[in-house]
Image (cartoon, rainbow, N blue to C red):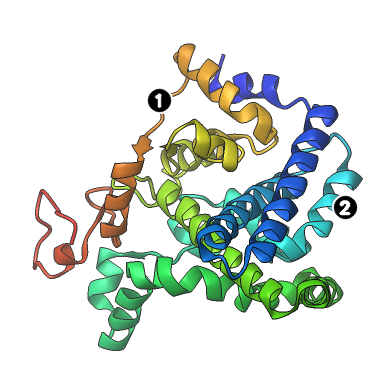
């Protein structure tokens, strides 16, 4: 039995489980949000609950993400309905994000289709040949400051109001999503004034930062696979172009098991609530050899900046300064 055949046994939907996951997550999200608001001006209580709201916002996004794959509920219509209704919380316009995300899945690890990738990446050859301004921009873009401090917040709050392929997937959907986001902020202002808006913005900052760490680390580790056809295959891109995040049970709970990312890319039809068990069973059966990353190892991923096609690994900027590739290719 192949790994792809094995995963098909885990694609069944459990609607009772799905509704329970959704209900608990939404109740916890709004409970934490309101607790943070009423706790003001007691920052010792308001700040932790604001952060918790952000973390729960990530969990809401993971439910929406599963709906994009029509994997959370058995009904396609229910998946799309819940995916659309959760968009004000996730700040992700459902229809265009679903389209763009499916492109990412279709071309993960494909160097000839990097336009579908969620984070820009250059090869070492391209970087060396690029003009000075482009190299300077790329260094700024790939810096932890951009990727962690300002980039995620700007991406979700501003840039996703004008999403890539938004015209192609329907301008009406974009306008609807933006109206829903505006309505969410307006409703919170009506209920709690500026305190509510400030808490929501704080939670968005926490949630988007964590939300940006996940796709970066799962696709930007040293041994990540990038290839071109005919060597490139979808299975190779999914299993070798994605890692597994072993950050602990609490992380799995808060992110609905999205850290088991290689299997998710191999078969996105597996519901999030069955993904971890599929991983454990596939590994026990000897069908899966994942690249697992711990929290400590995840920090090192921010040192990998360029892909070396000859060495088939990520390298740091220091490698690009050398006239020939160093065997060790230390990150910098």
Circle 1 sits in a helix, a strand or a loop, which is it? loop
- The answer to whether residue 53 is seen in the rendering is yes
Question: In front: 195, or 278?
Answer: 195
The 10 Å Cα crowd at callout 1, few under 14, some 14 to 19, many 20 or more, is: few
Residue shown at 42% from the left, 40% from the top: 243
Question: In front: 246, or 141?
Answer: 246
Quadrant in the picture for the N terminus:
top right
Residue shown at 77% from the left, 47% from the top: 27
Q: Is residue 84 left or right of residue 252?
A: right
Circle 2 sits in a helix, a strand or a loop, which is it? helix
Vertical placement of residue 26 versus 73, above or below: below
Q: Which residue is mark 2?
A: 81
Q: Position of residue 159 (x, y in %)?
A: 61, 77
First in residue order: circle 1 vs circle 2? 2
Q: Which residue is mark 1?
A: 289
Q: Is residue 291 left or right of residue 124?
A: right
Q: Which mark is residue 143?
A: none
Residue shown at 58% from the left, 36% from the top: 253
Q: Position of residue 39 (x, y in %)?
A: 64, 62
Q: Position of residue 204 (x, y in %)?
A: 60, 66
How far apart in space, not on screen, are marks 1 and 2 (Cα)?
Answer: 36 Å
Q: Is residue 265 left or right of residue 311?
A: right
Outermost bottom residue = 133
Counting every numbered tag in the picture gives 2
Quadrant in the picture for the C terminus:
bottom left
């Amino acid at each position: 039995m192949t790994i792809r055949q094995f995963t098909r046994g885990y694609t069944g939907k459990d609607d009772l489980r799905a509704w329970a996951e959704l209900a608990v997550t939404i109740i916890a999200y709004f409970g934490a949000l309101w607790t943070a608001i009423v706790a003001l001006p007691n920052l010792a209580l308001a700040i932790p609950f604001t952060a918790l709201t952000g973390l729960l916002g990530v969990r809401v996004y993971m439910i929406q993400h599963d709906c994009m794959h029509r994997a959370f509920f058995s009904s396609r219509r229910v998946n799309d309905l819940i995916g659309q209704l959760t968009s004000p919380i996730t700040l992700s316009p459902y229809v265009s994000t679903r389209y763009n995300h499916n492109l990412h899945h279709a071309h993960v690890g494909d160097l000839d289709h990097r336009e579908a990738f969620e984070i820009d990446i250059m090869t070492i050859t391209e970087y060396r040949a690029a003009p000075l301004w482009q190299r300077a921009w790329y260094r700024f873009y790939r810096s932890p400051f951009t990727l962690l401090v300002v980039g995620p917040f700007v991406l979700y709050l501003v840039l996703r109001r004008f999403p890539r392929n938004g015209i192609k997937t329907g301008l009406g959907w974009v306008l609807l999503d933006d109206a829903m986001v505006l309505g969410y902020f307006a409703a919170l202002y009506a209920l709690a004034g500026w305190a509510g808006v400030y808490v929501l913005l704080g939670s968005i900052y926490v949630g988007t930062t964590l939300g940006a760490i996940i796709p970066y680390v799962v696709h930007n580790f040293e041994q990540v696979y990038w290839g071109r056809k005919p060597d490139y295959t979808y299975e190779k891109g999914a299993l070798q172009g994605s890692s597994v995040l072993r950050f602990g049970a609490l992380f799995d709970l808060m992110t609905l098991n999205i850290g088991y990312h290689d299997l998710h890319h191999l078969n996105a039809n597996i519901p999030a609530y069955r993904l971890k068990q599929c991983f454990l069973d596939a590994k026990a059966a000897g069908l899966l050899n994942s690249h697992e990353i711990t929290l400590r190892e995840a920090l090192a991923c921010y040192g990998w900046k360029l892909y070396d096609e000859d060495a088939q690994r990520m390298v740091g900027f220091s490698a690009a300064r050398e006239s020939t590739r160093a065997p060790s290719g230390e990150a910098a």
